[in-house]
Amino acid sequence: MNKYGVKNASLDYVFVDDGYLLEMNRNHLGHDYYTDIITFNYNEENSLCGEMYISVDRVCENSKQYCAGDFEKELSRVMVHGVLHLLGLDDKTQGGEREMRAAEDDCLMLKIVSRET
């Protein structure tokens, strides 16, 4: 995270089901569709702070579709995705989505390297 100038971090992950996250999506964002994560940004200067609500149902479903059933890999990707949103990355455009995927891949490679060393 030093790449992003963060000195302190406080991250809360809340794991919920599809129904719960759908209601949050409707109530807080005005979106009427399922999603895997909703991130609330409470950042302060030089501090990364936020809450991330993750649908375990959606992660499980997406892991089957995108990761050949590797739930842990997909969950790691979603958790990193939320942190990247807190760091200011946005995936609403094609260019932003490419940047987000590249940053996710970079972060996930760090996880693999740190486990092996």
Image (spheres, rainbow, N blue to C red):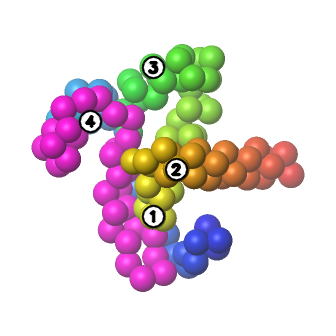
Q: Amino acid at mark 4?
A: Leu
Q: Earlier in the sequence, mark 1 or mark 4?
A: 4
Query: Which residues are drawn in magenta?
Result: 24-53
Front disc: 4 or 2: 2
Residue drawn at x 35%, y 52% as measured from the top left: 39
Q: Quadrant of residue 18?
A: top left
Which is more N-terminal, label 2 or label 3? 3
Residue that badge 1 annotates: 88
Q: Which residue is mark 4?
A: 21
Say whether disc 1 or disc 3 marks the residue closer to the N-terminus. 3
Picture disc at residue 61: 3
Q: Residues within 10 Å of mark 1 (few under 14, many from 20)?
A: few
Task: Decide: is 89 above or below 63.
Answer: below
In front here: 112 or 96? 96
Q: Amino acid at mark 1?
A: Gly
Q: Is residue 5 magenta?
A: no
Q: Which numbered disc flags the more N-terminal residue, 3 or 4?
A: 4
Position above or below: 19 against 109 = above
Q: What kind of element bears circle 2?
A: helix
Residue lying at 34% horizontally and 33% vertically, measured from the top left: 35
Q: CA distance from mark 3 to mark 4?
A: 14 Å
Q: Tell me the kind of residue under disc 2.
A: Gly
Tell me how many marks there are. 4
Which quadrant of the view contains residue 2?
bottom right
| Location of mark 2 (residue) | 95
Alpha carbon distance from label 4 to label 2: 27 Å
User: Residue 72's x, y, as percent?
Assistant: 59, 31
